[in-house]
Image: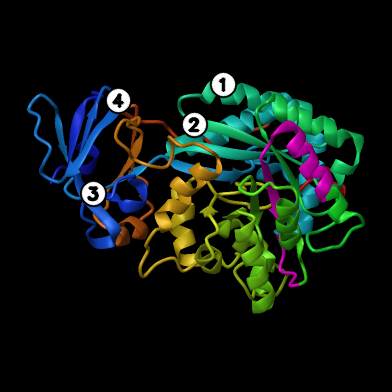
Amino acid sequence: MTPFDDIDIAENSFCLRDAQIHRAFLDSGDMPVEADDAVRCDVIVRGGRIEAILPSGDAVDPTLPIHDLAGRHIWPGLVDAHVHLDKCQAFPRLIGADGTFAGARDATTADREAYWSYEDLYRRMSFGLRAAYAHGVTATRTHLDSPEPQAEISWRVFRRLRDEWRGRIDLQAVAFVPLDVYGTPFGARLAQIAADAGGVLGAVTRSTHGLHGMPFEGFERLLDQLFGLAEAHDLDLDLHVDESGDPNARALAAVAEATIRHGYEGRVTCGHCCSLAVQPEEAAARTIARVAEAEISVITLPVVNMYLQDRTPGRSPRWRGVPPVAELSAAGVSVAVAGDNCRDAFYAYGDHDLFDTFRQAVRILQLDNPVGDAPALVTSVPAGIMRLPDQGTLRVGGRADFNLFNARNLNELLSRPQGDRILVRGGLRVRPRLPEYSELDPPRDHAPIQTIRTETVE
């Protein structure tokens, strides 16, 4: 068996012998599926593209270098469809971030108003992308806090980064503000900003000064205005919905009704949806059925919401903060897992490692015994949500972009952090280094925030 780190792919034409690929990553069902829903196969790469995926032992080409994987797993590039790159890596300078939603809301607002210059955003967002790339991510969708006047700055940074990372990470952005912003003149301007940048229109289904679950005047009217702007600019919608443990929260149901009312089926994504898990079973089932009818995709953020939800000083949490993924999936709803926040006010930890998020999601959401199609939740399903047909799968004719893991079955894969994973991009092994935290050290004239305000977007 070849030592894992000795698999040195230095040419873009080669054969990977005796690999395992989970069936969720393959667009062909003509090979027998073995243990753990994986296919044992040989992969031929020529000129940086996948030329063939054949049953193990069938690939014979004496002109190609052969790398024997001895049953190790190959995954496509990971697709992280819900992150906040503009918030990331700010935690060391935050004041008032106490792990609660309200504390995170206020600390984020103060940080944004004090420090979110073009240079600060570019430095932190670049750091996040470099870390994600080093961990095997090939596509990501970031929400951008977009109140006036921050939006113009943040979207300029996004456009620069999207160009710089083209060919390595497919980068998308969502215009992100509280829903009541769309009742102001700036709402129309923000829709235009997103459209001009090829972005996605978004909102959090609460008011500027409120929390999830708190009713506010004109909610459904504002939803209609948001959908109207999306229709006018032909933009998909991506919303933060019901991120609380309030069993009376009903924003998700309202979004489903608005989606059907506007004929926007298949174009809406809802993140979080935590409250759905604590509603009475019959009420939750009705909402899930309507979500399925509206063809809404749901993204669960299990690590961040388990950290953030049901937090009260001196009291242990009573629930996990995640929506009922099994029930949503059983109803035919497309569900993805994503990373969300990283070292910011809403989540103090993380390293933009979506595979680590997936490992934790299996435990938090009890996606195992068997794991089944769960690997699709960080690959092909979010690729579909982001409308990226070339991401999240391994297919003949596609670019040879994949991650090799030193694991021969899913239990081995999920039991270790897989910090020694091998990244192949365009048929060549790449060795990106994780960025050093010292790169984020503030200038000497950078003072801590002294006040906490109450206006924010998340």
Figure label count: 4
Q: Residues within 10 Å of mark 2 (few under 14, many from 20)?
A: many
| Residue 62 rendering spot, x and y as whole percentages | 7, 27
Label 2 vs 1, first from the N-terminus: 1
Q: Which residue is mark 4?
A: 48
Label 4 vs 3, first from the N-terminus: 3
Residue 440 seen anywhere in this rendered image of the structure: no
| Residue 453 rendering spot, x and y as whole percentages | 87, 47
Q: Is residue 229 magenta?
A: yes
Residue 276 seen anywhere in this rendered image of the structure: yes
At label 4, the amino acid type is: Gly
Is residue 289 or residue 94 the one in the foreground?
289
**Are dots 2 and 1 in contact, CB under 8 Å?**
no
Circle nearer the viewer, 4 or 3: 3
**Are dots 4 and 3 in contact, CB under 8 Å?**
no
At label 1, the amino acid type is: Asp
**Residue 163 bears which disc, if any?**
1
Query: Where are the magenta residues, as a range?
Result: 223-247
Element on which disc 4 rests: loop
At label 2, the amino acid type is: Ile
Q: Which residue is mark 2?
A: 169
**Residue 30 bears which disc, if any?**
3
**Are dots 2 and 3 in contact, CB under 8 Å?**
no
Element on which disc 2 rests: loop
**Mark 2 and mark 3: span between their CA atoms?**
31 Å
Circle nearer the viewer, 2 or 3: 3
**Mark 3 and mark 1: span between their CA atoms?**
38 Å
Left or right: 215 as drawn, with respect to 420: right
Q: Quadrant of residue 249?
A: bottom right
At label 3, the amino acid type is: Asp
Label 2 vs 3, first from the N-terminus: 3
Relative to 380, does residue 304 appear above or below in the rendering? below
